[in-house]
Amino acid sequence: MLARVSGPSMSPTVRSGDRLLVRRLRPGRVAVGDVVLARFPARPDLLVVKRVHRLLDGDAVDVRGDNPLVTDDSRAYGPAVAVGRVVARLRPRPGRLGPAPAG
């Protein structure tokens, strides 16, 4: 699946506007240090890209952003459930999207 990043919480590793290729995770297939797409049970409307900081009981993980100035992660919302692992960042090559807008 593809995910588009919005916000600075994973900067400089992943920047706002980046597109990420995400592979769905099977239970128990996540490791500390993985960059994942995760959902917080406390905020089911929020889907985030974060780094796994710690493995918790069951499928729960403690996730953190790479940007120390932004704390919209497990410190704010509690344990998360990783739904996918980021396997690639997709960036267009120059000239592949057509001409730049005038102005």
Image: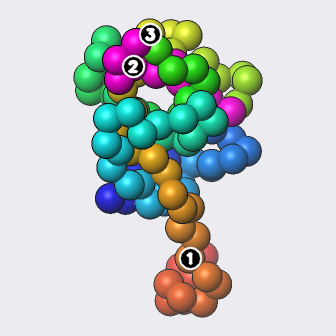
Image quarter in which the N terminus is found: bottom left
Q: Amino acid at mark 1?
A: Pro
Note whether 87 is above or below 5 in the view shown.
Answer: below
Residue 92 circle label: 1
Amino acid type, residue under disc 2 in the picture: Ala
**Up-down: is 90 above or below 45?**
below
Q: Which residues are magenta?
A: 57-66
Residue 78 has which mark? Answer: 3
- The residue mark sitting in front, 1 or 2, is 2
Residue 50 appears in view: yes
Which numbered disc flags the more N-terminal residue, 1 or 2? Answer: 2
**Amino acid under label 3?**
Gly
Q: Say which residue label 2 marks.
A: 60
- Check the image and report above or below for 30 versus 76: below
Judged from this view, the residue extending furthest toward the left is: 44
Name the residue at 50% across, 10% down: 76
Q: Which residue: 50% across, 84% down?
A: 97
Depicted 12 relative to depicted 27: above or below: below
- Residue 63 is a magenta residue: yes
Give the crowd class for mark 3: few <14, some 14-19, many >=20 residues within 10 Å: some
- Name the one closer to the observer, 95 or 101: 95
Q: Position of residue 14 (x, y in %)?
A: 63, 48
Q: Position of residue 35 (x, y in %)?
A: 55, 42
Of residues 89 and 24, the one nearer the viewer is 24
For discs 2 and 3, the disc positioned in front in the rendered view: 2
Q: Measure the C-alpha gap from mark 1 to mark 2.
A: 34 Å
Label 3: state its secondary structure. loop
Q: In screen coordinates, is 10 left or right of 31? A: right
Front residue of 103 and 29 = 29
Residue farthest to the front, as pictured: 28
